[in-house]
Each structure stands twice: as structure tokens, then as C-alpha cells.
Amino acid sequence: MTHDLDNLTHQLLDAARKAGAEAADAMAVDGTSLSVDVRGGALEQAERSEAVEIGLRVLLGQRSATVSASDVRAETMAEMAERAVAMAREAPEDPYIGLAEADALARDWDIDALELYDPAAEPDPAMLEDDARRAEAAALAVEGITRIDAASAGYGATRVHLAATNGFSGGYRRTQRSTSCVAIAGEGTGMERDYDGDGRIFQSDLRSPEEIGRSAGERTMARMAPRRPKTGAYPVLFDERISSSLIGHLLSAASGQSVSRGASWLRDALGREVLPAGLSLTEDPHRPRGMSSRPFDAEGLPTRPRAIVEDGVLKSYTLDLACARKLDLAPTANAARSVASGPSPSVWNVALSQGSQTRDDLIAEMGTGLIVTSMIGATINPNTGDYSRGAAGLWVENGQIAYPVSGVTIAGSLPDFLRRMTPANDARPWLSRVVPSLLVEGLTLAGD
């Protein structure tokens, strides 16, 4: 699919001006996606989609409205602009909205340095089907696996272009290749399942289907015949597969959207300790082949590396322009948007400091406790950080894995146990959230 996205966004801006908008920004996206699912050694589903979408935000003073469409005809754009202006006239005023100043806009970025697009040929459906079949076969080869819930492979290529009446215009393209497998063992109430998967920008970086399928099968078998531990306070190791969820809660609380509404336990927390001394949480939107890398944000501001937490101390909230104005802080170039919505804060590639010990070292130090490998649901009070989540994983006795567990609830104060974490050194460096396994002492587990 080929569209001149630069031209589309500027046509939208011209239509907005003619309709009476005082300012506007526009977004155009086109993409191709291909996915294949295999079950029982047979092709179950193959889908290919191609689409172009356009979005327009208009501003009338301190009022705004956003509209979108998948029709790129000139008459459609004119109707979009007229509808958006009419909507903006009826919208409530927001004193903090507005485009970036022209002298703050991104310029002269090196998109090639970010390596967001794989120049290799798009895989054909037969190649994706072969990957899915190989992953399924590898999982079924693990003793005890009875069937595969899903084995899938996919590919996507997307182009994005943004433009605004303040003079900004820029775009980039990115690709993604993925393979995943969900394996099942047991029957009825004794059934267990687990998964593995990988997604990369470059096809050559992707782990093999055999490794993914085998890992899914082995993870499933490790969950068989789970027990419930006794209720009490124990050390808990959050496995690297799910440890990023803890950091995700911290990032959510540090979002300017939550902080500016007063609905965050990190309000007024800049300069305070939120992680153990020595640990830092950094953001790098310029990491090559990073899934969230980008040269500029959705408001045209130049992205840059920053410290969210430095040596345990909160240094920065995640801000778009509106949140920055509301909090009287400098924006951090973290605006994200879709064609159908206006900007809101979002983090790019983040990484937590890794420790000096391996995951096995931390397990050996635990004595008796829980390794969490999956979590269910979440109850988190955004104002206090009180935390309660269902969990499953592996029970540790005398520093050795003893048996699988499920039906456990972990409870505590998130701000408190974030300050008591010990990281391992096992984070996967290609993920958008590079977070190692995390050991937390003395968490309350509700079991039998």
C-alpha cells in the first residue's frame, strides 16, 4: 500500500484552515499486517490487512476536537474539518491545550540510526505458517503436553506522518515480526497452560520457533499439580517475565496525567526516594531497534534520554505539553496519540538498573518463598498504592524450587516494597521495558 502521507496530513491542515480552525495538527498512518494461526498441525487462520487512517485535531482558542477516518478523498477531508470545527465550538475550554512553540520543534533527526525498519522482504504466508507449525511441533514434543491452544506468527509494517500548523512535519516507518505459542497440559480442573513468544523489529533477531515452542511446553509442565502455600509473610521473587508490571505501576503513578489530576501516590514526590539507593529507571527513545524508539513525539517535540528515577530518587514525571503546563514543568517529549485521539503522556523505552546477582543466586538466598511467574487481575489504589493481585508460580524451600503454586494473593503497599527491591541481572535488553527479576522481602501471601 502506497500513500503520500506527508501530502495527506497537509491536505487535512489546509481543510482545517478553510473550515475556520485557528490551529490544527494531523496524523496519517498506513500499514500492512499479516498473521497466521496453526492448530493441530493444520492451518487454522490466515489474515492480511492493509489500511490507511487519517486523524485531525482542531483548536479554537482553548477548545478542541478530534476526528478520524479511513477515507482519504478530498471531500471526506473537507467534511472532517468542518465537523471537527463544529465540535470544537461546543467543547469545554481547557486552559492547558495548545501546539508547541515553533522554536521547540524537532529538527534534523537521524531516523536511520534508530533502525526502526527491517529492509528484508516481507515474509510470505507460507513462511509464517512454517514458523507457527515449527513452534507447535516443538511444544508438543515436550512430554506431558496434550495440545496447543494457539501457535501464531505475524508481520507488520507501518508508516506514520505528523504535521501541524506550527510548522512541524515528520514521519517514520517501522516493522515488527512475531512468533508465539500457548501450550496446554492436563484435563478438566487439572488443566494448566503457559506460553512464550517473541517480537522484534528485525526478522533476523527473532528467536527460533523451536525455542519458543519448547519454552512454552516446559513452562506449562512446570505448572502442573499446583498447591496453595500457607498464609504468611515471605520473600517473593517476581520473575523477569512479569517484573515489568511492578515498574509499570510506578510509571503509571509518575504519568503527568495521573499526577495533574491528583490521582497518584507519586503526587508531590519529585526529589523523594521511590526505589532503593543505587537503582535508576531511565528512558531512551533513541535505542536502536527499540520497539518504542522514535525521533519525536506526537506533538513534534524532539525525544531525548532522561532519568525518571536516579539513584532511587524520582527525578521526572512523564509529560505531554498539556500536563506540563498544568504542573508548571517543562515537557518531556512523551506525547502519544492515535488518529482518533489527542495527545496524552506515554513512556518510550525504559530500563531499570540490573543487579550483580543471577536469578538463581536470589532464589538460593530466599530460603522459603514464592517465585511469581504469572499474575491475575489487579487491585491498586492509585492514591495510596495499596496493592493486591492474584498470582501463580513456584514455591521455594531451602533455596530450591520445590513445587508449583496457584491461587495465591499478594498484598502490600506498592510504594513500600518498591523501596525494598533487589534486582537480578537477567533482563532482556531488546524489550521496551528492560526489567530484571526482582526480589522483595516480607510480602504478605494469602493462601491456605
Image (cartoon, helix red, strand yellow):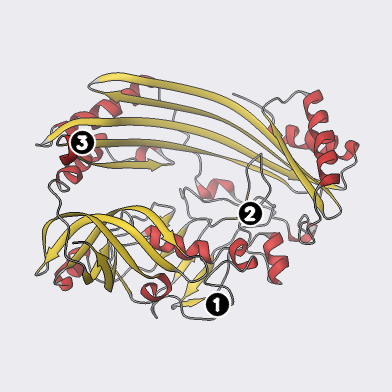
Q: Estimate the spatial distance between the alpha carbons at disc 3 and disc 2, rounded to whole Å.
A: 39 Å
Q: Which residue is mark 3?
A: 184
Question: Residue 111 or 400: which is nearer the viewer?
Answer: 400
Mark 2 closeness class: few <14, some 14–19, many ≥20 residues within 10 Å: many
122 in relation to 25, above or below: above
- Where on the picture, by quarter, is residue 20? top right
Image height check: is 379 above or below 328? above
Residue at screen point 65% across, 57% down: 302
What is the CA distance from the residue labelled 2 to the residue labelled 1? 21 Å
Q: Is residue 232 left or right of residue 434?
A: left
- Of the image marks 3 and 2, the number of the one nearer the N terminus: 3
On residue 436, the disc is none
Residue that numbered label 1 is attached to: 269
Q: Position of residue 315 (x, y in %)?
A: 54, 75
What residue sits 37% from the left and 56% below the top?
429
Mark 3 crowdedness (10 Å alpha carbons): few <14, some 14-19, many ≥20? many
Task: Residue under label 2, please give it.
Answer: 344
Identified by mark 2, the residue type is Ser
Task: Tell me the quarter of the image containing the N terminus.
Answer: top right
- Amino acid type at circle 3 is Ile
Q: Is residue 402 left or right of residue 12?
A: left
| Nearest the eye: 315 or 7 | 315
Label 2's element?
strand
Rendering quarter of residue 259: bottom right
State the SS at label 1: loop
